[in-house]
Image (cartoon, coloured by chain):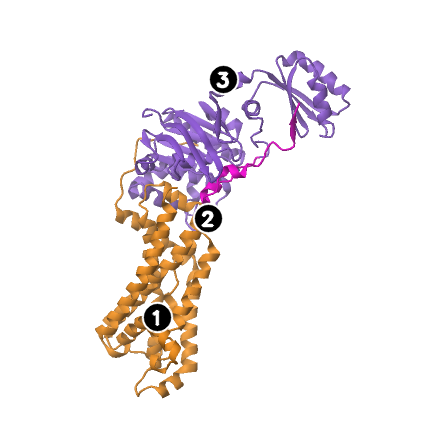
Chain colours: A orange, B purple
Amino acid sequence: MTTSTTTAEVASRTTSFLSDLMTIAKRAVRQIPREPEVIAPALFIPVFFFVVYLGSLQDITEATQPDGFDFKAFQLPVAIVFAVTGVSRAASLVTDIQTGYFDRLLISPVRRLPLLLGLMVADFVLVCSLCIPVLLLGFVLGVDFATGPLGVVAFVLMGGLWGLAFTGFPYAIALRTGNPAAVNSSFLLFFPFAFLTTSQVPKDAMTGWLSTIATYNPLTYLLDGMRALVTEGWDWGAIGGGLLAIAAVAMVSMTLAFSALRGRVTRA
Amino acid sequence: MTTAAISTRDIRRSFGDLIAVDGVDLDVQRGEIYGFLGPNGAGKSTLVRMLCTLILPTSGKASVLGLDVVSDDDAIRRRIGVALQEAALDDNQSGRELLDIQGRLYGLTGSEIADRITQIGDLVDQGALDRRLGEYSGGMRRRLDLAACLLHSPELVFLDEPTTGLDPASRAAVWEEIRRLNESGTTIFLTTQYLEEADELADRVGIIAKGKLVAEDTPAVLKRQVGDDRVVVQLATDAGAIRAAHAVGAVPEVNGVDVNGCEMVVATAEGASAIGPIAVALDGADVKVEGLTMRTPTLDDVFLTLTGERTGYEADQHESDPTADGQPDAATNSGASSGRSQA
């Protein structure tokens, strides 16, 4: 111990909301490449399903659809949705809660909202990044965008926003329970969203009950909007429907997540 | 209530039916090192968590640096530093990244953070700052945790068992830093179950047992209150310990006997004159004695006298912190005094 700590040189000062947000987000973004176990499944699953669906359903689906129906273009949004749904920093948040790091943050003067919003910033960066390799696979397989490069950007943004909207569910579970097993089980929510919809065949090829459920599944409208960007052009009706579906899911999930945050940070 | 660094009046905290802190009155002056001593589950961590604004008191009043812990929590957080019981670090970050985040949360600029890291000096292992925290040893983690809580130059620092589990060299380094910090004007609220630590560092000591403050004064005064010398008898085995305690207890000069395993501590007003009769009594009790030494009272004796419990010091246990997930720390009272008896 050769040097001393003193109290005179610096003192804490009030931070801005943006500064708090960036501090939390920076840490979360920095953690992403350090946890390849989070990224690997999110890349493997969409590529796997994309290839399997093409191999098993392309011929039969294209045979039953009008001429010019491109099953690869039809499946690309599904692969994107599979890549981004359920990917979040919720497991890391649970680790922070369990190790006491979350308490370290609570003892600091950081605003409470950025504690969750900062993680979501990182999630958005991650899910948009996850879209890119899937998109490249689509290009390699010959998918073209009717809306051009701007449509590609819009496509990635819609995928990213959907991924972000869905993160509210695992965060709500993480903050309510502080339990890693419960957070892992939130992945189950993915299945009804992802399979009771037009992820495999167009809606008019579905049986009655599945068609009915698909009508009420917001993912159906998201897929319609994203498919429109690929195959039809700037169909604002379909795109708007997709954005509304994202907004509806976000409203529910974020209400749950921020209510759970309030419960976690409120002193009792 | 406004001039003290910490002031509490009848502060209480319950978890359901369990009372973790039961009406504690404290006044810690600015510039003081206040040692808060108690066994596992006594309520130390719960009190710290109330004072550093993590949880609310169930009732009573508390102020920190003149600010109310209930209504002025944001202002308090900016002016205090806290190192909680477990060094809560993210193993995926490097030491420098952790300190950078900590500094940013308190509004420090990048250059200020870099300057502070240099000023904090040997408390952080400068060579290891860019390594991931998962590679740090326990001592390095604790010291980094302490450095992080000092980064914004707080006026008051809460150290919750800062040296628990540390090797002697790391412990000495932390003690030296605490002294140095205090010399620069920082008030220190130090919870510990190491009596030696409180004796070494604290200007005043408060002793908490079962949620209540049972004594408070300087270490010297507290030890004087116990008064008696101590004759420490080291028995070869604990088999005849109770028999030996009864025999020694019958010696007229002896005021009390405490047995803890193979060790027997005998309280006597005049150790020098009592040691002979004690040796004779032990011989008569037919027990094998390996050592017989005399010493003046320690804070351990104070604690034992006041609470009837040992602190768990010998076992080098550390208090778990179940209040972190909403459970009361009183629930973890480990019964550190088990296996001992008093005659």
Q: Are circles 1 and 3 on residues that touch, CB within 8 Å?
A: no
The percent position of residue B44, horizontal first and vertical second, equals 47, 33
Q: Could you say whether the residue bearing mark 3 is in a helix, strand or loop?
A: helix
Q: Residue A98 — which label? A: 2
Above or below, comparing residue A21 to residue B163 in the picture: below
Q: Are circles 3 and 2 on residues that touch, CB within 8 Å?
A: no
Mark 3 closeness class: few <14, some 14–19, many ≥20 residues within 10 Å = few
The mark tally for this picture is 3
From the image, state whether disc 1 or disc 2 is nearer to you: 1
> Mark 2 belongs to which subunit?
A
Which image quarter: residue A216?
bottom left
Q: Could you say whether the residue bearing mark 1 is in a helix, strand or loop?
A: loop
From the image, state whether disc 1 or disc 3 is nearer to you: 1
Magenta-highlighted residues: B316-343
Of the image marks 1 and 2, the number of the one nearer the N terminus: 2
Q: Using the image as rendered, state which of residue A39 and residue B319 is in the foreground.
A: B319
The percent position of residue A210, horizontal first and vertical second, equals 39, 76
Mark 1 closeness class: few <14, some 14–19, many ≥20 residues within 10 Å = some
> Mark 1 belongs to which subunit?
A
Residue linked to disc 3: B221
Q: Residue A217 — which label? A: 1
Distance of label 3 from label 2 (alpha carbons): 41 Å
Is the magenta region chiefly helix, strand or loop?
loop
Q: Are marks 1 and 3 on the same chain?
A: no
The amino acid type found where label 1 is placed reads Asn
The amino acid type found where label 2 is placed reads Gln
> Mark 3 belongs to which subunit?
B
Q: Residue at x 38, y 65 (%)?
A: A85
Distance of label 1 from label 3 (alpha carbons): 74 Å
Q: Residue B174 — which label? A: none
Judge left or right: residue A249 versus residue B219. Answer: left
As for residue B336 lying within the magenta part, the answer is: yes
